[in-house]
Structures are given as structure tokens and as C-alpha cells.
Amino acid sequence: MRPFILDPIFTSVRSLKGVGPRTAKLIEKLTGSEKLVTLLWHLPLRFIDRRFAPTIANAPSGKIVTLTAQVEKHIPAPTRARPHRVRCTDGTGAVDLVYFHAKGNWLNTQFPIGETRVISGEVEHFHGMLQMPHPDLIGTEEEREKIEIVEPVYPMTAGLTHKTMHKIMTQVLPHVPSLPEWIDDSLLKREDWPSWKDAIEKAHTPDDEADLLPNEISRTRLAYDELLANQLAIALVRNFTREQDGRAFPVSDEMTENARAALPFTLTGAQDRAIDEINQDMAEPYRMLRLLQGDVGSGKTVVAFFAILNAVANGAQGALMAPTEILAQQHAHNIRPFADELGLKVQILTGRHKGKKRTEILEQIADGTAQIIIGTHALFQDDVIFKDLGLAVVDEQHRFGVHQRLKLSDKGNGTDILVMTATPIPRTLTLTAYGDMEVSRLDEKPAGRQPIDTRLISNERLQDVVEGLQRKIASGARAYWVCPLVEESEIIDLAAAEERYKLLQNIFGERIGLLHGRMKSKEKDEIMQRFAAGELDLLVSTTVIEVGVDVPEATLMIIEHAERFGLSQLHQLRGRVGRGKEQSACILVYDRKIGEIGRKRLQTIRKTEDGFVIAEEDLKLRGAGELLGTRQSGLPEFKLANLNEHHRLVQIARDDAKLIIMKDAKLQTERGQALRTLLYLFERDNAIQYLRSG
């Protein structure tokens, strides 16, 4: 149960004065929840300083000022199109408060003649007269303290006004409780951080520009709290997983030697290293949880195959799960020849398998005839029962969630897990998204791979690109043409792809195919197979070919409106060529009116093919949320931590979390109880269940 101390901030914003269902919905749209706590994470972007209080005579035009003046007279609006004016004086001069469409009786109540008012807003000169259109704040002299303030300005959503937001936040802050301290004493002193409550209050009441920076002391403390909650949750999952009964799968030297002899190429040093790390993990009697990071074309599938052999050699089964049917088919195509040579039975299961065929496959999985099972998320389904699942390999983890990964491992007893991703991930992001795993990196390309010639061409020269493509295809080349991301809409992206397809069909005739996300799996496979077999010369596609599609004969990639893609996505797309012995090229067609970030992105991709360098740059340019190309990625979305600005804190939080688990794995000490509060505060409640489960 959530600690009672947090109840005041886990209540709905509807409990606040003046917040009805409509405003509550807008708050939810803005922060992701109606709970008060999410408003605490919603920090101001800038502020309005209302402390400048000159006399009327000295009030500069175009500035926000706070004036103290006596109401002299009302000048009602002569017509609806003209404003009502309230003239005020202070002995040095006069100012008109200007109100359009205001009710006269309201104005008379607010500004009785002869009374003094404190008024704050922007002043301007109009026909030689100082005026303040629609003052922001008004009050009596007794209310001066509430008006002469530094007023925070928050990120907004349509329908919410700055005034409403300010009223809400002034009601939220008094609800902030004093919480027990969860940060280690020595770290607190070293960083000179305030308490959590003081940090929240300071972050919401900036005094100057420096208070708005991510490295301001209160904001840094709050970022660390969020990162610690993330790392502690990960450490609890990791500890729980390792405590579960695992199984030892010692390496079979004979099978490994036979497999190596069957390979038509020599493994790279990086592949050998990764295989050794996996072998060591699998030989231990606890569950393996390892991430295999490999750049495009670095040979992850082969490494996964050697891991599967460890399970199979010990009488268990190995499963490889891919995010799409095309990828599952491709893995099966790559693995089958080696498996056949070793006398191992491979079976594939995807959503397209129905009826009698599906029943037959399920029987082979259940009775152990199928030793290596390759499939899509169809492998999750309840009726898929393995005889003995020893290893689950999950390809492109970020397309699945953490829970799906655990769901697959639950299909076996003490199942080892190997997660693969072709999306190079910066170190800080690896720690926050995959911190519950050990990491192996494939940072070498197989021998014989030539660098890809990457060129930037303005879309004004599109005709030159088409003519170059004609020459290439005439000489026997195969090419991809990737259409732009129009917006986050498959339908609109598809319309752009269909239009380009029709135009190119006029030039290239029938030897051109179209591939997009709304096609049925069977149609996609058919088009890909025709392209791979050389029946099609040109494949026009949306970004569905981004991950894993492997046609070594394709040597030219054209990406239209390249400035609309993220760096990692461009790198993934470019990786579809350069997979054979022939020299390959990638043409990035961009809009001449490209912005500064777009230009930097394209220059980076032109300069390097190192996916890890590209990923670090992408993190700087785009931030973590978008980097993995999908928001339902199981990747935590940080509200307070900025991985660019706070990357040093990630490592500190990781080390601290490790130490906490070593000393107090059940979080039962005084600090442990405070850390439980932290997990609930950042809604990492699911991590608490691992304390109970143990």
C-alpha cells in the first residue's frame, strides 16, 4: 500500500478550488494524469517578475510593472468596439486601465472611486497616455505581497490560461508533505542538496534565470530522485530475476565446433567476445538476462544461434522472437541451413499460421520435436506450450515491453533471456532502459563489408536522382526508395508512398514493388521475396523496412525528405544496403529550407557509419523519448531528469541502487522504508511487488 504520507499529493486536482471536470481534463492532457503529484513534476519554463514597482511617471513602456494608484474616475465604453477605461493616479502621473467587453458593475466593484489599488501588468503609451490593457493582477494594499511576486510560467496546453495555472499551482504547493530522506547522507552533503520538499518549492518559485536551468541545485536534486527511483526499480527486478531458480547450460564443445565449421565466414572478435560472455552466463545456475547490442549488420543472429545451441545441447529448447513476420521469416531463413547441418529441427510460428498447420506446429513445440522455435509475438499466446524452454531470445526489445519479455520467459522453468537490438543505444540510455541486464556490444563489422558512400542531394535535384537510379538499375543493381514520414499517421504516410510509387512506375514499369505497414503480412512477405529473388529492381517503401530486412544484392538506398527522420532511423535505413561485397550508396534527399538541427543530423550521418557515435549525437539533438523510435518502448519517460544534462547522475544512481540491494535487498531499514516512499512517489509501484514476491 502507498504510504499515507503521500495521500495529499495523490488526490485529484478536482479537489482544488475552482477546478471542475473540464479543467481537470486539460490538466490530464498536459501532465498525463489528474493527480496533484504530476503537477509537481511540471516545472516552470520562465517567470514574470512583478517586483518592479516604479511611480506612474517612471513606468517604462513595454515592461511589466506593479503600480500603486488611487482610482480617480471610470470612463465607460462609448460603443461595444471601444474599451472601458479606469483612470488611476499616484501624484506623479495618471494611467488608464483598459478593459474590452468587461461588465461595468464588475469594474465598479473592483475599482471604487477614491480607493487605492495595487495593479500589475504590462504598460504602454497610447496617444501620449500611459495605459495598462487588462491588468494581470489587482488587489488592495493589504494584498501587495501576493501581487509583487516572481510568478512562474508553465508549459501549457490549449484551453488552459496562465492565470488558471497560477491559481492551481498556488493551491498545490501547500499540499507538499515533508518526506523522510532517502538520499545517502554523504551524497546529500557532497552535492549540497536541499530536502525533497525544499527542492520542490524552490523549483516552482524561481527568482532569476539561473533557477530555471537543469543544473540548478534544486532541479538537480529532483532529477536525481527520479533517476534513483528508476535505477532502484530496475535493481529490484534484476535481483528478483537472479534469485529465481535458474539452470546451468554448459557449452557443448562438439556442437560448437561443428557449428563453427559450418559457417561460411570467420566470426569477428566482437562476436567471439559476446559468445564467451553468454557462455559464461548460461553455464551458471542462475537466470541469464543479457542485452546484445549490435550495430546494423554486425552479426547478432549468429551470436544468438550459438546461445540457442547451449540450450539445445543440454536437452532444452531455444526460442527467437522477432517484432515482425518479415524478420521472423528472415531469421528462420538464416538459421535453418546451420541447424540442418547439425541435425536440429527448426520450427516457425507466426500469426499467419492457422487451423491444422498451427495445431501441428504447437504439437511439435509441446512434445519437443521442435528444438529451435522462431516466431513473432504469436509465441506469447496462451496455447503455445513449450516442452522445456531453456533460452528466449527477444529481437528488437524496444518494440516489445519489459512485461512481454518476462511473459515469454515465464513459458519455461528458469528460462535464460537474451535481448537483441540493432538500435545502438547511448550508455546513459542503456542504463535507464535496460539497466536490469548485463550488456554485450558488437562493435565490429564482418570482414569484407565496404563502407557505404553517403551523399546529400537537395530535392530540387530529384530528377538527377531518378536518372542516376535508371543508370544503376540498367547495370543490374537493386534499390530501395524510402518515402518521407509525413506525420505520425500510417494512412498519410501511405498516400505519399503510393504517389511516389505511381510516378516511378511510369519510368521503371512492372519491375517495381510497393511495401507499407497497412499491407497484410502475406503480401509484405511476397513483395520482399520477389525483391530478394531479383524479380523486382526497385522497392518503394515506408519505414517498414527499417529493421532487419536483408537483401545483400540491394546496393542503393534513396531516402526522400531525409531531414524528417531521426538520426538512428536514418542509420537503420542506410543499413539495409552495404550487406554484400558490392560497393553501396545511400542518397539522402533533403529540403533546401532545412533547419539547423536537420542540417546537423544529416552532416553527422554523412560523416560516420558508427551507430554508437550516431546514437550519442541523436540523444543530444532529440532527447531520449524519441530516440528508440517508439514511445511504447518500455523506456521510462522522465519528467525531471534530462539524460543530456544529468548523465553523470545516472551512474551515481546506478551505483547507489546496487549498494542498497547489497545492504538491504528487502528495503527494511529506516532508509529502506524511505526508499519505498520514493518508489511510490514516482509510481514505480510494480517494483514493490518484487520485494513481496521474494
Image: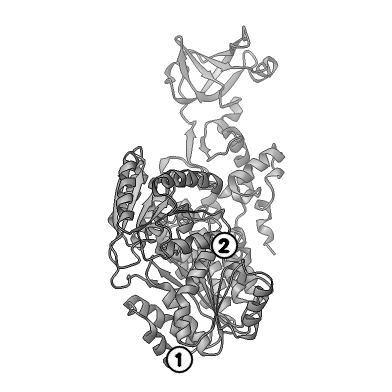
Query: Which residue is pictured at 44% across the width and 10% down the height?
Result: 128
The answer to whether 562 appears left or right of 641 in the picture is: left
The answer to whether 436 appears left or right of 574 in the picture is: right
Query: Which residue is pictured at 59% across the width and 19% down the height?
Result: 116
Residue lying furthest front in this view?
Answer: 510
User: CA–CA distance between discs 2 and 1?
Assistant: 38 Å
Query: Which residue is pictured at 46% across the width and 47% down the height?
Result: 501
Viewer-nearest residue: 279 or 500: 500
The answer to whether 311 appears left or right of 601 in the picture is: right
Position of residue 284 relative to residue 150, above or below, is: below
Say which quarter of the image contains residue 594.
top left
Q: Which mark is residue 522?
A: 2
Name the residue type under label 1: Ser
**Residue 625, percent from left and from top:** 49, 54
**Residue 604, percent from left and from top:** 31, 53
Q: Which mark is residue 93?
A: none
**Residue 162, percent from left and from top:** 57, 34
Tag 2 secondary structure: helix
Q: Residues within 10 Å of mark 1 (few under 14, many from 20)?
A: some
**Residue 572, percent from left and from top:** 41, 59
Position of residue 482 relative to residue 648, above or below, is: above
Whichever of labels 2 and 1 marks the residue nearer the N terminus, that label is 1
Tag 1 secondary structure: loop
The answer to whether 114 appears left or right of 123 in the picture is: right
Name the residue type under label 2: Lys
Q: Residue tagged by mark 1?
A: 252
